[in-house]
Amino acid sequence: MPTSPIPPVAPGAPFAPAPRAPVPAAPAPSRPKGADPERWPDVVALPRASGARTAVAERLVRRALARLPLRVRLADRDSIGLGGPLMDIREPDAFFRRLGAGGLIGFGESYMAGEWESPDLVGVLTVLAGNAAGLVPAPLQKLRRLWALRQPAAQANTPEGSRDNISHHYDLSNDLFALFLDETLTYSAAVFRGFPAERDLLSAAQHRKIDRLLDQAGAGPGTELLEIGTGWGELALRAAARGARVTTLTLSREQQELARHRIREAGHEDRVDVRLCDYRDVTGEYDAIVSVEMIEAVGEEFWPVYFRTLERCLAPGGRIALQAITMPDDRMLASRSTYTWIQKYIFPGGLLPSTEALDRVTTGHTGLRIQRRDSFGTHYAETLRLWRERFGERAAQVDALGFDLTFRRMWTFYLAYSEAGFRSGYLDVQQILLTREDPA
């Protein structure tokens, strides 16, 4: 039986957040010097780009920025924009050359290279995210396949590709993640009681999120629960504390090792089995299935396989509780084959679904049906802010782990970029309850 029930949250309006207090901008990190060309080849060296392509990129970007509530300063040349957060482009020639050659990948690499800065990075990126649909002129949007970089075949989420993709991110270092996550080591959106969120309440907010999922799944004494995507084991721990028996799957050896250690230390080793296993290979039947922000790493071509696996493993009368990051359907359809900065540097093979895509794949390929959705994107923005601030404060410890300045700029950009997506409303996160329509 579920414990500590959380009051239901209306879909689309999870909480009425208090007015958000201004967050002081963290000091901009120093510009990287002497970056390792073997580790960061496309940051150290400017890309090849024709003068014509660079010129076109500069005209388009200038025109787009001039219409936005930003203050864009281009070295000693001029300033454009309607006023707002400052974007300081220190090396315009390099900046526009990167955009001409690589689009948004070049935009992120230019930040990694220190060619542009902002005292309010999240503010700048929030404006850009909120206007994403109109940044590229409509005629060029229709020709996207001609100019946008395509996803590499090597990043496809086959069983072997998924292991490599997951390892790229999650096997960086358990110690690195511990530097900016809270003590629960939970790497997904928390659910807060009010805003602005306080850092010392993050672990409670993570437990609130986990408990809501376990409540939806009906996890309690004797429940056979399958978790797809172990993380570092906190959900499995809380499910075991309820009396459930948990089988949890991960492709990360680092996560498996630490999750097993934490579960053993908590005295739940007899209730939790942490397997190094692809979701496609899982067997058995389970009363409840939970998966937190795992669908984003599956890949569109494998979404039907993923949901058919959930259906195959679900016992009659069972329940599935998912947490998923979503994006607008039209943007997903337009960009689903585009190679992005996030895919190149952070999550190879990743793709965010839309709400409509989840409906299409579950109704088109399975007997699973979505029974309810609870959205809480603003909570993810606050979660990311807390992670970003803590990461910035611990720069010396990140360095001590062997991660250089270019990595720190990359990670800072990733956290700010993600936070901006949720602050602008471009991204959302949902908890989703599914059940199976069994034949009468």
Image (cartoon, helix red, strand yellow):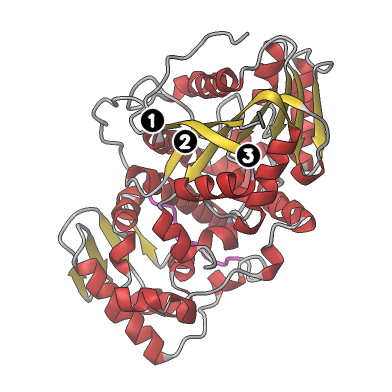
Q: Residue at x 58, y 40 (%)?
A: 293
- Could you tell me the amino acid type at mark 3? Gly
- Could you tell me the amino acid type at mark 1? Pro
Q: Residue at x 43, y 50 (%)?
A: 327
Q: Is residue 376 left or right of residue 163?
A: left
Position of residue 127 measured from the top left corner of the image (x, y, whole percent): 28, 54
Above/below status of 246 relative to 171: above
Q: How many marks?
A: 3
Mark pair 2, 1: CA separation: 9 Å
Q: Which mark is residue 26?
A: none
Question: How many residues crowd mark 3 within 10 Å: few (<14), some (14–19), many (20+)?
Answer: some
**Residue on which the image places disc 2:** 430
Above/below status of 203 relative to 438: above
Mark pair 1, 3: CA separation: 23 Å
Q: Is residue 135 left or right of residue 67?
A: right
Mark pair 2, 3: CA separation: 21 Å
Q: Residue at x 79, y 25 (%)?
A: 261
**Residue on which the image places disc 3:** 367
